[in-house]
Image: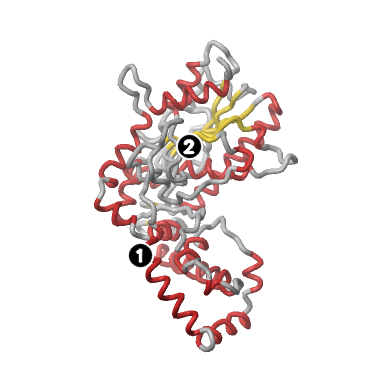
Amino acid sequence: MGRKGQRAAGVALGGLVTAVMLCVSGGLAAAEGSAVQGSAGSRSADPNNSGAGCPDLLVVAASGAGDSAVDRDPFVDQDQLLASNWLNRVTVPLGEANRDQPGTVGWMYVPYPSTYGLGLLADVPTYQDSVAAGVASMNRILDEKKAQCGAATRFVLLGYSVGGEITERVARDIGHRDASAAVTADDVAGVALVGDPYRPAGTPSLGAPGPAGGGFMASEPADYGALDGRILYDCRPMDIACDAPPDIALLELALGVLGQMRFTILNPVQTFADFGRVASDMSARAIAHIVTREDWFTSDESLLDVLRTVADQTYRDDAATAAATPERIAALDAWARGPGADVVRAKAQAESVGFLEDNRGIVDLIVKPYLFLGPIQHVLYWLPGPAPFLGDSDKVVDWISGLARPGA
């Protein structure tokens, strides 16, 4: 039974996997999302940052959860929270590496809520709403700089962890735009994804063979359209974000559901209300998906596949929703209870076998050292390598510099 690719977004806010990712991204204070707000105009840009003008290459960077805000100054380099941003380990050294050629590179950080949907005192956006806001913010920066600079500036999209999901979505969209769009694939020199939760299984890391696993949100092959060949993945072994074992479908579904909910500690009623809303919406969309596919009961698509698909808030099938009339649903119900009963039973039996196959990787998460090594590996991207070796962030800097100064 195949694992269907999906664009589910979310994070498990309960259990060990959530604890891992929250610790990595700055702890509960980071999850609050409002502990440190952006401070527009409070600090001038790095002297090597030509991003306010029209550099040859502009890096548009989306940092991890907890390290941004909707009013973040896109030119301020300091971490919003202790040991959380990390992307300034790429941007600032990139400016230093190219300081002998002013105007070659610049960078901007993407302002977005950057929450997991977890609020200690105040209501916060859901994880999926936060990611959607980040996508809109990155696109807004690209559109505005394109209008300002035209063909004089090309872009590099850089994303880490949750910011990797934002960057993934933007890159895949740009790769499939037609020539009439404001920003097209011709405007993008490259895309760097660090600790990407949607990394396809087994893809190279920093140009060398990469870990066999893939993103814990989805690990199927990615279609970047016209941007294929311009993607750099950086994934460390056992980093659960990008090197999770395959066949963890139930976890992916949980992430998709939890990513649509708010967890305000002092208002638990809100969490239960959100769960009811999400369950109702997913049920309606799942029914529409099944009812409008006449061969569904004889297909390889499982109910778990359907639920993972409709948990993705980027998934929309308006035609199916409109076609799933009460009469059509009643007719399918009558068929399943009568002439189609044997087909339904066969489907259910196949589902029970396929469920175990689709979720066998969850055992690996527990019995192998993913939960121990994952948090460590998820931050080692940003530490310098022992001399004379380069650390991961140094290699990303070199890769971007090569795009800015081809042939140098």
Residue 356 marker: 1
- Decide: is 394 above or below 373: above
Q: Considering depth in this image, is 394 or 91 the residue closer to the camera?
A: 394
For residue 304, say whether it is visible.
yes
- Disc 2 residue type? Leu
Residue 193 marker: 2
Q: Position of residue 384 (x, y in %)?
A: 34, 24
- Decide: is 387 above or below 308: above
Q: Considering depth in this image, is 269 or 137 the residue closer to the camera?
A: 137
Q: Which residue is situated farthest in the top direction here?
A: 100
Quarter placement of the N terminus: bottom left
Q: Which residue is situated farthest in the bottom direction here?
A: 338
Horizontal relation, residue 228 to residue 216: left or right: right
Which residue is depicted at the point 47% across and 46% down?
198
Q: Position of residue 134 (x, y in %)?
A: 53, 44
Q: CA distance from mark 1 to mark 2?
A: 31 Å
Crowding at dot 1, Cα within 10 Å, few <14 / some 14-19 / many 20+, comes out as some
Which residue is depicted at the point 70% across and 27% down?
151
Residue 154 marker: none
Q: Mark 2 or mark 1, which is nearer the start of the sequence?
A: 2
